[in-house]
């Protein structure tokens, strides 16, 4: 007998499988990342009526059989289609990047309800406003904390000296946190980071989710955090993110 389950979810991606089915990966509230088979999804458009597009927030009903390789998604109800995220190129680039981060950083079948909330509130922000780079940096900082890779921003990782009592500080990607000038080893790869940037990132780590996007970064904080965060994340994931180059091109074009 299959076990029937239900959860809120966000569609990560879909790929055709054989002639008639699709493999759909969801990020679900209750079960985390979930790979499923959507039977008949290629053949009949009516069956899931537009629900299996990336970024869609929906309720899924799925069944698991002990001998089956994948759970089977049987029924879906759309909660928020997030149309703008697919139709506007800039919004698409932003949303694709944060969704790829979630997909690459999290293991399958492990629930992360706080990351689900973070993703949802970020989609709402990108969907409803002109997105800016602060959203990306806030999302990255918070995601790192919630996924178990919180950046050490309060003290030097080697000598524990208080960051706000230390004049010159750096971020060391290999250590995942701050390092003071006394503790840097020869040829160690570090990025300089100012106290203002550290304060912004500390806010992104600890503010209530509902207040997260009220934070505005100084120009310096945008520049420094952009040097630090994407490359630190790539070192954790161990590969380049496909959506990052596209996002950088889109942001560059928008400015010109
Ligand atoms: Zn130190």
Image: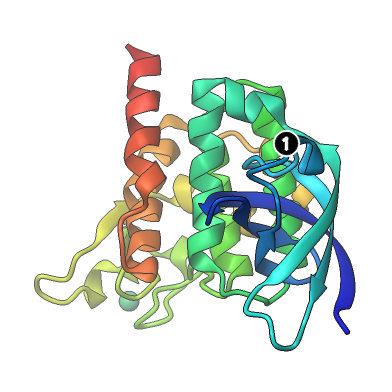
Q: On screen, 143 above or below 15?
A: below
Residue at screen point 48% across, 45% down = 196
Badge 1 local density, few (<14 within 10 Å), some, or many (20+)?
few
Residue 179 placement (x, y as % from top left): 33, 70
Q: Quadrant of residue 32?
A: bottom right
Q: Quick check: can you spot residue 214?
A: no
Instruction: Measuring from the top left, give residue 128's x and y in whole percent.
Output: 72, 24
Instruction: In this rendered view, identify the residue nearer to me: 10 or 17.
Output: 17
For the C terminus, give its image quadrant.
top left
> Which of the 4 image quadrants contains residue 170?
bottom left
Q: Is residue 173 left or right of residue 211?
A: left
Of residue 43 and residue 36, the one placed in the foreground of this image is 43
The reply to whether residue 127 is visible in this rendering is yes
Q: Ligand 1 quadrant? A: bottom left
Q: Residue furthest bottom?
A: 66
Residue hosting label 1? 45
Nearest the viewer among 165 and 157 is 157
Say which quarter of the image contains residue 81: top right
Eyeballing the image, is 155 above or below 245?
A: below
Q: Secondary structure at mark 1?
A: helix
Q: Residue at x 43, y 37 (%)?
A: 222
Say whether residue 41 is left or right of residue 168. Answer: right
Determine whether, in the image, residue 152 is placed left or right of residue 37: left
Q: Position of residue 163 (x, y in %)?
A: 45, 65
Q: Residue at x 33, y 23 (%)?
A: 252
Q: Residue at x 51, y 72 (%)?
A: 149
């Amino acid at each position: 007998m299959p076990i029937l389950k239900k959860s809120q979810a966000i569609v990560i991606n879909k790929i055709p499988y054989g002639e008639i089915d699709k493999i759909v990966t969801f990020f679900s509230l209750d079960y985390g990342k979930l790979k499923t088979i959507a039977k008949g999804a290629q053949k009949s458009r009516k069956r899931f009526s537009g629900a299996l597009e990336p970024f869609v927030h929906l309720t899924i009903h799925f069944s698991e059989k002990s001998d089956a390789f994948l759970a089977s998604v049987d029924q879906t109800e759309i909660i928020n289609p997030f149309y703008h995220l697919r139709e506007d190129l800039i919004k698409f680039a932003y949303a694709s990047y944060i969704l790829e981060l979630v997909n690459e950083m999290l293991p399958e079948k492990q629930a992360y309800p706080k990351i689900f909330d973070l993703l949802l509130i970020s989609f709402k922000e990108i969907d409803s406003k002109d997105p800016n780079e602060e959203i990306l940096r806030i999302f990255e900082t918070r995601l790192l904390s919630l996924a178990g890779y919180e950046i050490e921003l309060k003290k030097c990782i080697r000598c524990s000296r208080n960051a706000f009592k230390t004049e010159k500080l750096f971020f060391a990607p290999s250590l995942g946190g701050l390092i003071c000038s006394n503790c840097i080893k020869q040829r160690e790869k570090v990025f300089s980071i100012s106290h203002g940037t550290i304060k912004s990132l500390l806010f992104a780590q600890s503010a209530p989710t509902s207040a997260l996007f009220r934070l505005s970064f100084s120009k310096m904080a945008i520049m420094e955090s952009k040097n630090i965060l994407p490359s630190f994340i790539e070192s954790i994931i161990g590969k380049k993110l496909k959506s990052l180059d596209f996002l950088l091109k889109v942001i560059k074009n928008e400015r010109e």
